Amino acid sequence: MGISFATEVIPIEADASGVLRVGKTRVTLDTVIAAFSNGATPEEIVQQYPSLNLADVYHVIGYYLRRPSEVEAYFRQRKVQTNAVRKENETRFDPQGVRNRLMARSAGRVH
């Protein structure tokens, strides 16, 4: 009797914003790979993010280990997008003086 090998789909899905998430969870690929790169085992990652499936975490880490340049390119692209959004938000909402404005607003309230 032989073993039947099925092709498995990598449990990574892009959300509406193009962010890659693991399985059907909200946990990002970035989060899982960062934890792994910082020395966490797949079991520890699942412990920290219980919505993850252990087999999915192993699968995702295996994908990363087989295709590090592709995953790193995705991370670089995400960093560029994140920086652009941050810059846009800082232009729209000047971060200078936020604390002072909040304190002034708070002081104006009656407790």
Image: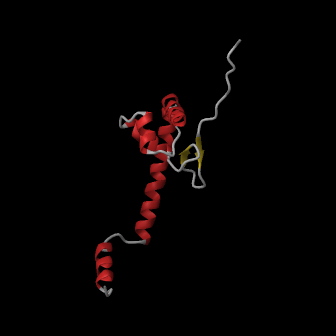
Q: Residue at x 40, y 67 (%)?
A: 90
Return the x and y of residue 66 as percentages of the image width and height: 52, 28
Return the x and y of residue 47 as percentages of the image width and height: 43, 41
Return the x and y of residue 8 as percentages of the image width and height: 64, 31
Q: Nearer the viewer, residue 90 or 9?
A: 9
Q: Nearer the viewer, residue 89 or 59?
A: 59
How does the figure colour the protein chain or chains?
Answer: secondary structure
Q: How many marks?
A: 0
> Does 38 appear above or below 110?
above
Residue closest to the far top: 1
> Does 61 appear above or below 15?
above
> Does 58 appear above or below 107?
above
Q: Nearer the viewer, residue 14 or 69?
A: 14
Tell me if 3 is positioned left or right of 36 in this view.
right
Return the x and y of residue 59 as percentages of the image width and height: 54, 32
> Does 107 appear above or below 35?
below
